Image (spheres, rainbow, N blue to C red):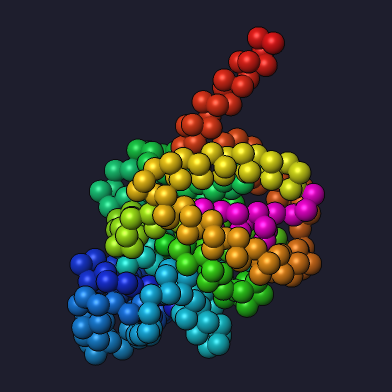
Amino acid sequence: MKKSVFVVIPNYNGSGELKASVDSVLAQSYTNFKLIIVDNDSHDASRRIIEQYVSDDKRVQAILRDKNYGFTGGVNPGFEQAIEEGIDYVAPFNNDAVANRHWLKELVDFLDRHPDYGIAACKLLHSDGKTIDSTGDIYTVWGLPYPRGRDETVSDNYDDETTIFGASGGASLFRVSMLRQIGVFDQDFFAYYEDIDMSFRGQLAGWKVGYVPTSIAYHGQGVTSGRMGNGFTTMQYVKNTPFIIIKDVPGSLLVHILPRFLFAYSISLVKALCNPSTTGGALRGFGKMLALIPKKLVERRRIQKTRTVEAAYIWSIMLHDLPPNARRLRSLRSKWQLLIKHS
């Protein structure tokens, strides 16, 4: 019997991209699914478009929210409904993404074949199909996440199924029994890095994450975040990246990861504060992060108390290097190594 699936599209003022996204989901070769569109109080033509889909196709359901709750608040209502109704799998899907016809089928087949995997990630390409947006997520021993393969030219380098650290929240498939165990997206993230946090919590609870290269989707990177105003991405980075350390990193690994992270984070924060276009976002993000630390420490106790894997396993699945895009840090590290060598 085919497993039941919910696909959840969060939307905020995305009328220009929404139709292509919805149409690609409705055209999937895997047919045992319901599509839930969660609208975060859009003020463009989105709601009219959504109402038409609900009227025309019994597979489509809408959840209309009273304000913009971000990506997390735009996906969690679908997650929660899937848990409540006993659905097998749930797939968040960006409103600026378009799925290959077999995107969902390949992800479902993978989780069906691998009962110890809680998440399956697709090959997410940029909208031109020539470069990679993500083939899953990396988490480094510097405490910095990075989309695996980001901006690389499409090649056969990522054509093999493999186990990865995390999955992009934009077009992946989640096992609902895992969500029932570890919870839904942390809504305090609002947007960005909530998928790393979710994957980390799944790994700590003993679930694995798989990459499925035959499942393909295309993403217009940054389209939605661009509507959020200047400094939004900076604010989310400053606010959210420390949460992963605070909540998820096992205590015995903090001595290795925290000093590196604080060094890298401080450099990024100072750079953002010195740039007039990002100063406000950096200050807002830092203030929100500080205010939420007590809450995140409470969450940490619960997460670490229920951890079922050894810290050594978590250490083994991290990237023991800087992210590929950390050019400033790599330059500083090279200069430091050169100084040590000459001294």
The magenta segment is: 238-252
Which of 156 and 172 lies nearest the eye of the viewer?
Answer: 172
Q: In the image, 336: left or right of 91?
A: right
Give residue 114's position: percent from left, percent from top: 60, 63
Which of 157 and 285 lies nearest the eye of the viewer?
Answer: 285
Quadrant in which residue 232 is drawn: bottom left
Q: Residue at x 53, y 32 (%)?
A: 329
Would you say the magenta stretch is mainly helix, strand or loop?
helix
Query: From what the image shows, is residue 319 above or below residue 211?
Result: above
Residue 117 seen by the camera:
no
Quadrant in which residue 243 is drawn: bottom right
Give residue 44's position: percent from left, percent from top: 21, 75
Residue 41 seen by the camera:
yes
User: How many numbered marks have been drawn onto this rendered protein structure?
Assistant: 0
In reply to whether residue 165 is colored magenta, the answer given is: no
Q: Residue at x 67, y 16 (%)?
A: 340
Q: In the image, 99: left or right of 298?
A: left
Give residue 201's position: percent from left, percent from top: 65, 63
Q: Residue at x 69, y 11 (%)?
A: 343
Give residue 166's position: percent from left, percent from top: 56, 55
Query: From what the image shows, is residue 276 above or below residue 24?
Result: above
Q: In the image, 300: left or right of 285?
A: right
The extreme top residue here reads: 342
Q: Residue at x 51, y 53 (%)?
A: 238
